[in-house]
Amino acid sequence: MTEAISYQNTLPSRATRNIPMRSRGSGRGHCLADLPVLARTITVEVESGLEFGTGLVILAQPDLVDLHEQAFTIQFIDPSGRKRNHTIDFLATFADGRKVAVVVKNTAEARKQRFQDNFARITAAIPRHLADEVILVTDRSFSSTQLRNASKLHHFRMFPDPEADEVLTAALRGLSKPTTILEIGLITGLAGRAYRAAFRLIFAGIAHTTETGVISPRSNLFAGGVV
C-alpha cells in the first residue's frame, strides 16, 4: 500500500544561516529529503529555482548519504584585499566518505571575471576537513532530462511502496530479456505502481535502463546496474 511521508515527522532545515525571503532574482522554497544518515525525513531549504533543481539532481545520486544546505561559511580575501564571507550552498556526502561542497550560480554570473576570481579564492580557503572537493553548478551543469527524471524520482520517493519495490525486484530477476515497465506492470499486476517502483529501483542501482531520455512506461528495464 502506498503511503505518503508524514510532514509531522519531518525534521527542520539544518541551514547555518537564515535564507532570505523572496527578493529580486531569488525565491525561498524547500523540498523534503529522506537521507540515509537520518532516521527521519528532513526539510532542505533553497533560495532559487536553480538551487532547487540542483538539490533534486544531487538527491538522485545513488551513493549520496547526506545533503546539507547552507552547511558552513568560510572567510576569504577578495582580489581587492577585502575580507569576505561565503556560505556554501550545499555539502553533499557520499557513501565512500567523500564530501563535496557545491556552489550554485547562474551561468551569466558565473562567467563574470569577478566571480571567477572569488570562486578560486573560496575554493582555496575551504579546509580539507570540511570538504574534499568544491564544484560549481550552473544552469548548464545538468540537462532538462536529468532534472525531469530527478524531479519524478523525488516525487515517487515521497510515497514509499515497499511491496511494489519487492514485487518488481523479484520480477526482474525472472526476466530473460529487456521488458518495458508497462509490460512488467501488466505481468505483475502492479499497473501504475510499477512505474513508480521502477524509478526508485533504477536510482537505487537495483534495476537498469538504457533510456537516455526521460524514463517512461515504455522504457526497457533490466535487472542490476545503475543509471
Image (cartoon, rainbow, N blue to C red):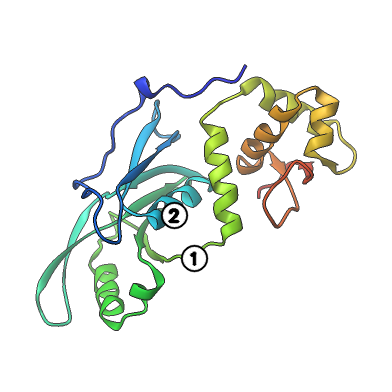
In the drawing, what numbered circle is on residue 166? Answer: none
Q: Nearer the viewer, residue 215 or 96?
A: 215
- Which element type, helix, strand or loop, lies under badge 2? helix
Please state if 74 lies on the left or on the right of 83 as rendered.
right
At 45% from the left edge and 53% from the top edge, which residue is drawn? 53
Q: Say above or below: 71 vs 191.
A: below
How far apart are the alpha carbons under marks 1 and 2?
Answer: 9 Å
Please state if 188 lies on the left or on the right of 224 as rendered.
right
Q: Position of residue 49 (x, y in %)?
A: 40, 54
Furthest residue in direction front, as rendered: 24
Q: Say above or below: 42 vs 163.
A: below
- Which element type, helix, strand or loop, lies under badge 1? loop
Q: Position of residue 20 (x, y in %)?
A: 21, 50
Please state if 73 lies on the left or on the right of 97 as rendered.
left
At 33% from the left edge and 73% from the top edge, which residue is drawn? 109
Please state if 103 lies on the left or on the right of 143 as rendered.
left
Q: Amino acid at mark 1?
A: Ser
At 59% from the left edge and 20% from the top edge, which residue is drawn? 2
- Name the residue tied to disc 2: 54
Q: Position of residue 204 (x, y in %)?
A: 61, 39
At 58% from the left edge and 55% from the top edge, which residue is drawn? 146
Image quadrant in which you'd find residue 197: top right
Label 1 vs 2, first from the N-terminus: 2
Q: How many marks?
A: 2
- Name the residue tied to disc 1: 141
The reply to whether dot 1 and dot 2 touch (C-beta < 8 Å) is yes
Q: Amino acid at mark 2?
A: Thr
Other-residue count near label 2 (Cα within 10 Å), few / some / many at <14 / 14–19 / ≥20: many
Q: Say above or below: 130 vs 172.
A: below
**Which quadrant does the N terminus fall into?**
top right
Q: Position of residue 203 (x, y in %)?
A: 61, 43
Furthest residue in direction left, as rendered: 82
